[in-house]
Amino acid sequence: MKFLTNIAPVKITLEVLAVLMLSLPDMVEAQVLVPSGSFHTVMPEVKGEPVAVDSFYMDMTAVTNNEYSEFLQDHEDWKPGNVPSIFAYKGYLKGWENTNSDEVVNPNQPVTSVSWYAANAYCQSVGGRLPTLNEWEYSAQLMDFDSSVDAQEFASRLMSWYSTFDSENIGNVGSSGIENRHGVKDQFGLIMEWVQDFKPVIANDLSLDCGTVGRMQKLGNAYSYAASIRYITRMSFSPKSTNSTVGFRCAYDVATIEEKEANL
Amino acid sequence: MKNLLLIILLLFTATNLVAQHNHNHSADNTLNAKEIDSEHSVYHLDADWTDHRGDVVRLDDFKGKPVIVVMFYGNCTDVCPILIQDTWRLYSSVDESVREHVNLLAVSFDTENDTPEVLNKYAKYEQLDIPGWHFMTADDADIRTLAMMLGVQYSKKSDGHFAHSNLVTVLDEKGRIAQRVEGLNQPMNEAKATIESIMDRLNK
Amino acid sequence: MKSIKLTFTLIIGLLLTGITTLSYAQTDEYEMDGMTFGMPEAEVFTEDYDGPPVVGDHLSMLPNLEPLDYEGNKTHEVRIDIVAQEIEVADGVKYEAWTFGGTVPGPVLHVREGDRITFTMKNRSDEPVTITEPTKEGSPFMQQVAQNNFMKAEEATMPMPHSMDFHAGTVAKDDKWRTIAPGQSIKFDWVANYAGSYIYHCGTPSVLMHTAMGQHGVVVVSPKDGYDTGYEVDKEYVIVQSEYYLKKGPGDLYQYDYEGAQNRNPSHVVFNGHQTILHDQPLKANAGDRIRLHVSNNGPSGTSSFHVIGGIFDRVWLEGHPFNEMRGMQTVLLGASSSATIDMIVPEEGKYILIDHEFADAEKGATGTLKAGPREK
């Protein structure tokens, strides 16, 4: 199988993988292990040195309207109307007529119009956290294609998606047909997702001007071009932003999952 | 000693002049503090913090009086000492009668290394284990949330160090951002004036 | 407190200060050569505004130019919001565009050299905005769109970060041309220091994509002493050439063709945003008229060899500046973001074709009609 051209070789410790995967009880089957490795990012980096990422667990799909609604039942202070404006713009959960969990509209669609603060609070409440930017991007590019032509075509489709995403018809989680090799679904094709540090370290050097994309897409392929669009879009958000096409998923430290494991 | 002071003064003036005209030049580790909304209170953050004395505190324990907040990490050897020094400079410039009411929160984003015990050592080493100063830690997610509200960016690098913004924030008695001083070695006179005027207002 | 170590670090730190201090430069207003520089810092904020996306007295829909009905200089209060909109750009070709004010190109702003503009822009790409309802508070642009909705504009939602770059403004781009997230607004002042026709466009990367997706328009800055011609102009129009890079999407709508854009291979090259509009609604004049065309090539990438079939350009001011007068040109070469103000005598009754004489462009739609009626005098 050929890979996208910007992936550095991935190291998978099979023993760790086997032990963790086999011992997963039902309650954590919605999270999968993304094993440690490294990758080349579109951000400026030390020449030839890919970014290293430690193993972590990630939600297989984005957090759904249903799951978020359950969170609201236990955390009334996150219901629209109760959230102070320091934590979200007015558009928070716009389109949610009411917040009773038995009346969730589009229950299996990813929740959107949530601010960074809301996403962060949700992940905290389930014992996790938002993924870091590097974790999210690393996981996103761990995809396998049958040929480099297929990989190119996928990257082209990504570019089309960034100019046509439709907040009216998002689709249920899992419906994008896009999955990385560990089973993480829909990192493209449905929504954009919050990460912990969405305005990354070197953001200031990239003064977001006309030349930015040229400087970012030094990897010279459509995937990195699409990645630059994604980085730039994400960097422009405020933590209070409540966009109809931005949602999130949670990540978990390996230690947390192992502990949960051990306590069963 | 006098010579040393003179040299420091000259360097201070020279670099300050240079600093006024420099923008968009950033050392590798320094980030812009982002645009933030100053109309709302950070005390909305519902979390437990542990300070270097081992006490569990909440942010709104400090409400009612002005607060100075700075974010840093202990293993930072080049930039954070200056930032802490700047914060001290602000704190000590405030009139004595006002200063006794001001709390100073120094929050570390390095939860792995900067435990309350380590923070205690740090405070003592910097001779900053004084009443009113609180070196603090909490859960990663809560520290990140506070940073978001203040407009501090930080990111952990692979060598364990952090790339981060340099920001000293003054909160008013309700926990709203009243003044932000971005960068290193910045003049603190406006921030000092803000703190004193908050107290003036409260004393009326 | 002042340990030796700390003092030493302090000295090193002071030296580092020069490279580590960041802030927006704040230059106080000043004059030079009769022009005004040094605008106050832009404000980025959130507002509840849900009124008309285009507000201001001197904003019109192409090819119209709103007359300057005042003497000397004034300060204009202008709002042009960013909205996503589904529009038709050629027969049967519709796509969801990113726009200023709801049309592609956006509204034409007409000001006088030396005027000040207080500009507000809200990024409303995450909310559906209708532009076809006439409103009292909106600008002439809005009335004109309501009466003549040739792009068949329909509301759409596509939240994206955007920014504004007025080529007519002379300001620091990291301050005024800042990118704002959906839901945010920006407000700043700028002074039209130079006469001419200037593009405005979204400066958020990828600028190729944002411009190709529709975010561009024109500001016509009329010279304070006019063009020294000795005659009155009978008709004045604004023409904007631009490219679309579109390919068929999975459904009925078209979508951005990233490869086409990278390879400078547009699907459509048009005048005033629509492949056939200047044929469906030709420009009108009479034999013997002196017409003035403000022509801008907004790109994003192409050049235009602008010519009017049957005519010769009597006077051409490159970039629209009175100092740059050329006489008797058959074709004006306009690079991407270049413009020209062109005076032409309409020789006789009949039809004239506006064209980008680079025929690969013309055949993709870069043509229009000027219909001339009988001599009136």
Image (tube, rainbow, N blue to C red):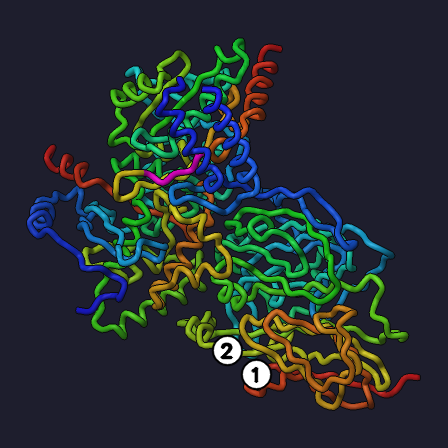
In the image, is C48 to the left or to the right of C348? left
Q: Quadrant of residue A144?
A: bottom left
User: How many numbered marks are there?
Assistant: 2
Determine whether A240 is above or below A263 in the image: below
The residue indicated by pointer 1 is C361
> Which residue sits at x=54%, y=26%?
B188
Q: Position of residue B129 (x, y in %)?
A: 35, 15
N-term mark: 2 or 1: 2
Residue sitting nearer the eye, C98 or A93: C98
Classify mark 2: residues with Cα within 10 Å, few (<14), some (14-19) or many (20+). many
In magenta stretch: residue C364: no
Q: Label 1's element? A: helix
Q: Chain of mark 1?
A: C
Image quarter in which the N terminus of chain C is found = top left
Residue at left offset 61%, top offset 72%: C273
Main SS, magenta region, reads strand
Task: Using the numbered discs, state the Cα–Cα distance from disc 2 to disc 1 in whole angstroms.
Answer: 9 Å
Q: Which residues are magenta?
A: B162-166
The amino acid type found where label 1 is placed reads Asp
Q: Position of residue B197 (x, y in %)?
A: 60, 18
Residue ID at (30%, 57%) = A47
Q: Would you say residue A97 is visible in this rendering?
A: no
